[in-house]
Amino acid sequence: MTIATANPQSTKPRDVQVMPIGPGTMVLRSRTWDRLKFEIEYSLKKGTTANAYLIQGDRVALLDPPGTTFSDSFLATLAQRLNGRAIDYIVLNHVNANRGATLEKLLEASQPPRFICSNPAAQTLRSLFPDRDLAIEIVRGEETLDLGQGHLLKFVTVPTPRWPDGMVTYDAASEIVFTDKLYGAHVCGDQIFDEGWKTYEDDRRFYYDCLHAAQSKQVSAALDKLDGFAAIAYAPGHGPIVRYGFTELRHAYRNWTQQQTAKELSVALIYASAYGNTAAVAQSIAHGIAKAGVAAESINCEYLNADELKGAIEKCDGFIIGSPTLGGHAPTQIQTALGIVLSTADKTKPAGVFGSFGWSGEAIDLLETKLQDGGYQFAMPTIRVKFAPTQAVLQQCEEAGTDFAQALQRASKRRAPKPTAGTADRTAQAVGRIVGSLCIVTASQDDVQTAMLASWVSQATFKPPGLTVAVAKERAIESLLHEGSVFVLNILAEGKQLRRHFMKNFAPGADRFEGLTVETASNGCPILTDSLAFLECTVRSRMECGDHWVVYATTDSGKVLDSSGVTAVHHRRSGSHY
């Protein structure tokens, strides 16, 4: 599928929030209540913060200044806080091109600061400023920097496929680890620390699932390194500083990482990205794979290790490869990776191809043709994204990843020996006697509309009137049912054909409502006018329960559309499937 997209412009105000967080240490939080980027990790639409940190001892260090979006307001606030002092060091726990405008202005100082970063980050810096003679101190192991007044900074590299230049910084004076992409959340508010930390559980889990689930092996190694610091708080690049829920979040990261590495089936996700678009698509595919209970291992070809790629290909159950198109060609790193895949991957392993492009998509054609000629079978349609992906595009990519994972699971079940009847089978039959009303849950967000057939629905509260819906983790609609989201519960009547319509399999991005009579509820979600009744709902909380999320929502309004109808009920013979 080929998808043309564009980036919308932000309209909401932004500001910079400043607060001391330790001796001689302050946070400068550039805030936006907009989504900011159309990447899967921003899809909860709760805004975000870009956290920079200023440490002032005998010398001054600035950690992770924000990107172009916040440059002017941040630099004005920073100048006030410096009170005439010069910045001696800029510590970059990772570098991207978006920070170029802010860094350019910081380098205009009469005495330009020195950079401290990893070697991959140094390469990016030199490419951003080819005409400048930059002073860069490269962290290769566990270097230190003494700023005076007790501020002994320790630097440790934590490379991952998404951020090969990743690094964390520890300050002995404040006992804070500046963790950059670890332990963050895309949520904007007035709280700087995480008081009432349970409020952020859903946001932090979503952030982890989107960004770190597909690089769990590297995240596990990074967590080991962080455990070596005598820290009392983590200061991430986005969201609140972790102090009150410090122990709980550390344990949660360990548990989530172990869950990923313990999965029986795995997919190798191989890609390179020139401008971040292909990486965003890869992240969405990986999220869809993980939702279905299959592990996704991201492999960034820009930092290719041939032996690691061979090992990943040999042990994976399927693979997906993606590429940008540069000058009508695939990057050299992708061509090298493709050669390794063709010479290593078993022909029985399902394959997939994706990529992004501006004017043409020759790299995608190359990957698709080479794999087809090599005799590989595709378990998902080839994804072609023109320009930057929107939410609708990312939703389609996520659904494609889920379809790929489910195809692996079906193949695995066919190969597995048939279980014999016993106590478990009798228990499943008994569980199957629990009945529920048949409903269609519909949701809408921006340019995404989706729906699912649900039978595990129950009233949960009188005051306020509320209900619960169990949603399988791999369902496409799950991403639209987080705290604060809205949906419509369409309750079906016996004898209606809506059930059959929603029982069929939909291709990624397919219109779930084609051929149906639909109206729009006051909360913006579709109402199926042929249903028995409908309720407009707001998600208040959700709980992870095995292979499902149980979503609790309160009802805002509703109406009976057919007063003579009878609610449809789902009768099952087994509790092990729908």
Image (cartoon, rainbow, N blue to C red):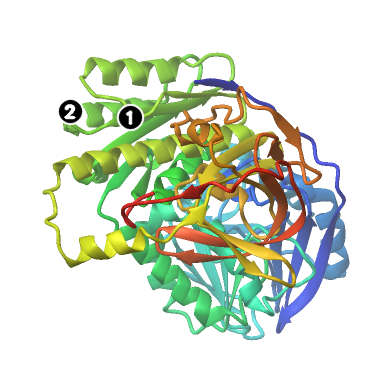
In the drawing, what numbered circle is on residue 257? none
Q: Which quadrant of the structure image shows residue 187? A: bottom right
Cβ atoms at labels 1 and 2 below 8 Å apart: no
| Residue 323 visible (yes or no) | yes
Q: Which quadrant of the structure image shows residue 245? A: bottom right
Q: Determine which residue is flagged by label 2.
A: 347
- Horizontally, is 566 left or right of 382 in the view? right
Q: Determine which residue is flagged by label 1.
A: 379
Specify the amino acid type for callout 2: Lys
Image coords of residue 14 (percent x, y): 84, 53
Image coords of residue 236 (percent x, y): 61, 66
Q: Secondary structure at mark 2?
A: loop
Q: Which quadrant of the structure image shows residue 237? A: bottom right
For disc 2, the neighbor class at 10 Å (few under 14, some 14 to 19, many from 20) is: some
Specify the amino acid type for callout 1: Ala
- Horizontally, is 251 left or right of 180 in the view? left
For disc 1, the neighbor class at 10 Å (few under 14, some 14 to 19, many from 20) is: many
**Image: 196 above or below 439:** below
- Horizontally, is 430 left or right of 173 in the view? left
Q: Residue at x 61, y 25 (%)?
A: 387
Is residue 171 or residue 378 the one in the foreground?
Answer: 378
Is residue 213 or residue 417 the one in the foreground?
Answer: 417
Is residue 154 or residue 302 the one in the foreground?
Answer: 302
- Horizontally, is 350 left or right of 281 in the view? left
